[in-house]
Amino acid sequence: MKVSPYLNFGGDCAAAFTFYEQCLGGRITFKQTFAESPMKDQVPADWQDKLMHVTLAVGDNVIMGSDAPFPDYTAPHGMQLSIAVPVAEGERIFNALAENGTVNQPFQKTFWSPGFGMVVDRFGIPWMVNCE
């Protein structure tokens, strides 16, 4: 069994996944807009170019996402995406996620890790970066 996070966005899913692809060193393996789907007639004209589904492969992991049409979108609450990486990579990823985001705990050494930080990125997704 694999468990994969599925992230919802309020219209900026494409920008978020392009950023995550670069930041995390992943590869977008699938992307479909609402206009490219059988649901295109059920979606407002200004939402046709939004993503119905996207898949990002990061190592052996997958992160998926979509834009959730208003009023269906709600900001993430009660969860965080946690990544575990070497220290040098962790600091780089943390700093990238923190750019135009909100740092909840600065990246620093802790009693359990040589580097740990918590941030909500510019797209509203909460992350924990934990170094091995």
Image (cartoon, helix red, strand yellow):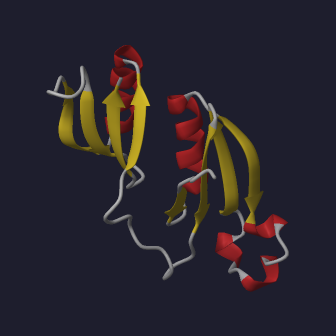
Where does the image place residue 125, in percent across and percent down from the top left? 40, 53
Regarding residue 12, the answer to whether it shows in the image is: no
What residue is shown at x 76% (from left), y 58% (from top)? Answer: 32
Task: Report the front residue among 50 and 58.
Answer: 58
Identify whether 13 is placed above or below 42.
above
What residue is shown at x 31% (from left), y 64% (from top)? Answer: 78
User: Which residue corresponds to the image point at 35% horizontal and 59% vertical from the top-left?
Assistant: 79
Which quadrant of the figure has residue 118?
Answer: top left
Q: Quadrant of residue 68?
A: bottom right
Q: Residue at x 74, y 62 (%)?
A: 33
One can see residue 98 in this view: yes
> Which of the image's four quarters has the C terminus?
top left
Q: Is residue 18 left or right of residue 127?
A: right
Counting from the top left corner in percent of width and height, residue 63 is at: 58, 48
Q: Based on the displayed image, in which of its 4 quarters is residue 57 positioned?
A: top right
Q: Is residue 108 above or below residue 45?
A: above
Q: Position of residue 129 (x, y in %)?
A: 34, 34
Image: 38 above or below 2: below
Q: Which residue of the protein is positioned furthest toward the top in this rendering? A: 88
* Left or right of residue 14, residue 78 in this image: left
Image coords of residue 120 (percent x, y): 32, 48
Please identify the residue farthest to the front as the structure is shown: 1
Q: Nearer the viewer, residue 132 or 75?
A: 132
Q: Report how many numbered discs are placed on residues in the image.
A: 0
